[in-house]
Image (cartoon, rainbow, N blue to C red):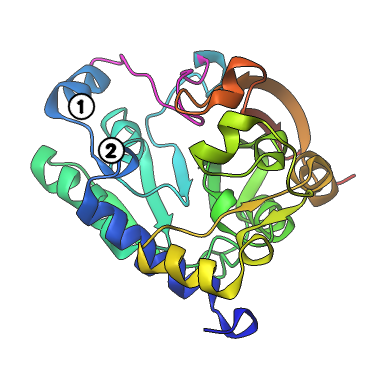
Amino acid sequence: MQKRKLNVREYNRYAWDRQVEDGNKFTVPVGPEVIAAARRGEFAVLLTETLPVPRDWFPDAFAGLDLLGLACGGGQQGPVFAALGANVTIFDNSPAQLQRDQQVAEREGLSIRVVEGDMRDLSAFADGSFELVFHPVSNVFCPEVRPVWREACRVLRPGGLLLAGFANPVYYLFGTTLDEQRTLKARYAIPYSDLRSFSPDELQAYMDEGTPLEFGHSLSDLIGGQVEAGFAICGFYEDICPDSPISKLHPTYIATRAIKPREAR
C-alpha cells in the first residue's frame, strides 16, 4: 500500500473497531456501579489517562446541559454525563466504539444520541448546538488538529466550554513503541506522523496488526490552534501515561479548559 493513497480516517475506523474486539482498555464501558454513583451526583471522568477532570471545570449543574462527546466513543464518559442529566451526543469515527455507548444506554435506561463521523467535520450539527464539548485524548489519531478546534468552537454557544485532552509532543520525540521509549533516544521531529516514520513494509506490518495510526501535533497547533479558533484558555493540567517510560521523566498528556467568549473578539 502506498502511503499517499492511504485514507487515514477509514483505516483508523477499522483499527478502532478492531481494538474493541481485542478489549483495548479505552473501549471497555463503565459498569452499573459507575452509573448508579453518577445518578447520585458522584462522578469522575478522564480527559487524559489517570487524573480525573476537576469538578470546577464543569458547569454547576448537568441537568438539561447540551453536551457533545467529541471523538469520545467507548461507553466511558458519555453514559456518566447522561446519568448526571445532560443531553448527550457522542460523535466518533468508530461504529464499534459508538455501540459501546449504546450498550450502556440500553442497559441503564439512558438517552444517548450517537453520530459517526470525522472529528474535523461536525457539519452534522448546526452552529451553537452545544454548551459543552468534551474531547478526551483522541486527536492523536487525526492528521490535522486545527480543524477540530474550529469546528468545536462553531458548534458551541457563546460562553460554552471545550474540555480537551491531548498528547504532549515530547512523547513522540522518542517513538511510540516501548522498545523505542526505553532507550529515550530522540528519533523523530514534531509534528510527528506514523506515515513518515515507517518504511512502506513497516507501515504495512503495523497496519496488519490493526494498530491505529498516530500523529503528534505541535503545541502551536494544540494550544495556539485553540486560541486562533476563538477560544480563551482558562484551565490547564498535565498527566502521565503509566505504561510509558517517558512518564518517569516528563508528563505525557495535557488537558485544557477553554471558553468560547460571549462577545466576538
Mark 2 sits on what residue?
79
Residue 146 visible in rendering: yes
Q: Which range of residues does the magenta coloring cover? A: 40-54
Q: Is residue 233 above or below residue 24?
A: above
For this rendering, which residue is in front, 260 or 198? 198
Dot 2 falls on a residue whose secondary structure is helix
Q: Where residue 218 is drawn, which disc sits there? A: none
Q: Is 43 included in the stretch rendered in magenta?
A: yes
Of the numbered discs 1 and 2, the one sitting upstream in the chain is: 1
The alpha-carbon separation of the residues under discs 1 and 2 comes to 7 Å
Query: Residue 251, position in %: x, y?
Result: 64, 22
What residue is drawn where x is 20% and y is 27%? 35
Q: Is residue 94 above or below residue 66?
A: below
Q: Is residue 18 left or right of residue 46?
A: left
Query: Residue 81, position in %: x, y?
Result: 35, 33
Kind of residue at disc 1: Ile
Q: Is 241 included in the stretch rendered in magenta?
A: no
What residue is drawn where x is 78% and y is 48%? 190
Mark 1 sits on what residue?
35
Kind of residue at disc 2: Pro
